[in-house]
Image (cartoon, rainbow, N blue to C red):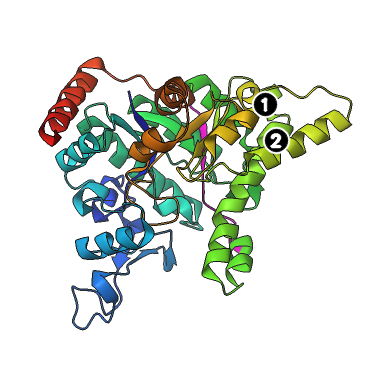
Amino acid sequence: MIIDSDAHVMETEHTWDFLAPGDEKYRPVLLAPTGDERFPSTGLPGGVRREFWFIDGKIRGFRFASLSKKEREQRSRVSGRNFNAPEEAREMRDFRVRLNHMDRLDIDVQVLYNTLWIDPVAERAEVEIALCKSWNRWMAEVWKQGEGRLVWSCVAPFVSIPDAIEQMRFAKQHGAVGVTMRPFEGTRQAYDSYFYPIFEEAERLDMPITVHIANANVPYSDFMRNSGDQVLSTFGVFFVPATIICHAAILSPVHELFPRLRWAFVETAAQWLPWIIADAKRRVEGQGKVFPENVLKERNIFVTCQTNDDVPYLINWAGEDNLLIGTDYGHFDPSSDIDAITVFKKSSGLTEEQVRKILDDNPRRAYGIKVAEPALAEASGRKGALRHRAR
């Protein structure tokens, strides 16, 4: 089985059709500045449409620009990476298009992450709770329609621990295989003792804490973004915090308190792993303690790599049992390449067994994925037919 460990959905107006009765007043509104193709005189190149979510009186959350097919193809040519996912598949408007595209990409299962919660979404707790509930119910419907091939990591309103646990339980019953947590959740870092009830419940539900690149600490994000350099600010806002939390997951007492809890660090690439492992080893041994030979395996930590990572070198440091790979399907950033798995299989420099672990064994363990065999058999048949036609 080939598992795409990092794929995305793009929220649409339909996402909020699942708001609970009484919560409709919190419904986000999708705004397009004058210049959108639905309005005259765009002024934006190549079919790009910039849109924003208006939530509780403010521009909130994260939304990628919508690109025309021509613009997606152009960006793919310039970058050398394939971004050209059909819009109806990115937004889950047509499940069959999404599943057929997965067949063509030789992907059996995708683990789906949100896009909106990469940035802060709401200030008021009641708004955050309502939107998390709606998103999770939308994804429950996606899972139901996805023939066992579209599993997901839920969003939880961590401003209210009881509501967060309630959402985790709902999600587990409806196809979720993880609990998404941003590295910085407001004024707290993801390993803070405040989240211990979340870790306890995640352990009970056999769900990993999935730390996708994101940031919900507004002062820190504002500080980094004020650098004036978009590339540097994006790297600082989203990528660096994830490495901090992975380092903490190695050194903090969380692994002792919750020994069965799994962590997945997603869309961070992995070339930084030798740095933090070496630093953690030095600190532990400096206290006269023994550092594990394979600390990721001992701490139940999984990390997604990318096709431009030196994976054989990473295996020397991190072993071959805790690396994953994803396509970042649906996004258009430096981590994205919907052909990543195909490229990885051809050019990773790994043995067949190591490739199988990263594409199958490791994500199964990381996410606790159990997929109905009939769905997989049907998918394998479709992929076989596609390959036959290609020959």
Q: Amino acid at mark 2?
A: Ile
Q: Report which quarter residue 325 is drawn in.
A: top left
Residue drawn at (23%, 32%) of the image: 146
Query: Taking 366 as reference, is 34 left or right?
Result: left
The secondary element bearing badge 2 is classed as helix
Residue drawn at (31%, 58%) of the image: 76
Label 2 with label 1: CB-CB less than 8 Å:
yes
Camera-side residue of 305 and 131: 305
Residue ID for mark 2: 277
Which quarter of the image is occupied by the C terminus? Answer: top left
Residue drawn at (81%, 30%) of the image: 284
Q: Which residues are magenta?
A: 207-218
Residue ID for mark 1: 295
Image mark for residue 331: none
Q: How many marks?
A: 2
- The image shows residue 246 at horizontal and vertical percentages of 63, 39
The secondary element bearing badge 1 is classed as helix
Query: Taking 63 as reference, is 281 left or right?
Result: right
The tag earlier along the polypeptide, 2 or 1, is: 2
Res 286 seen here:
yes
Camera-side residue of 270 and 156: 270
* Category of crowding for the residue at label 2, using alpha-carbon neighbours closer than 10 angstroms: few (below 14), some (14–19), many (at least 20): many
Q: Amino acid at mark 1?
A: Val
> Does 213 appear above or below 385?
below
- The image shows residue 245 at horizontal and vertical percentages of 64, 42
Query: How far apart in space, not on screen, are marks 2 and 1 (Cα)?
Result: 8 Å
Residue 175 part of the magenta-drawn span = no
Query: Taking 143 as reference, is 97 left or right?
Result: left
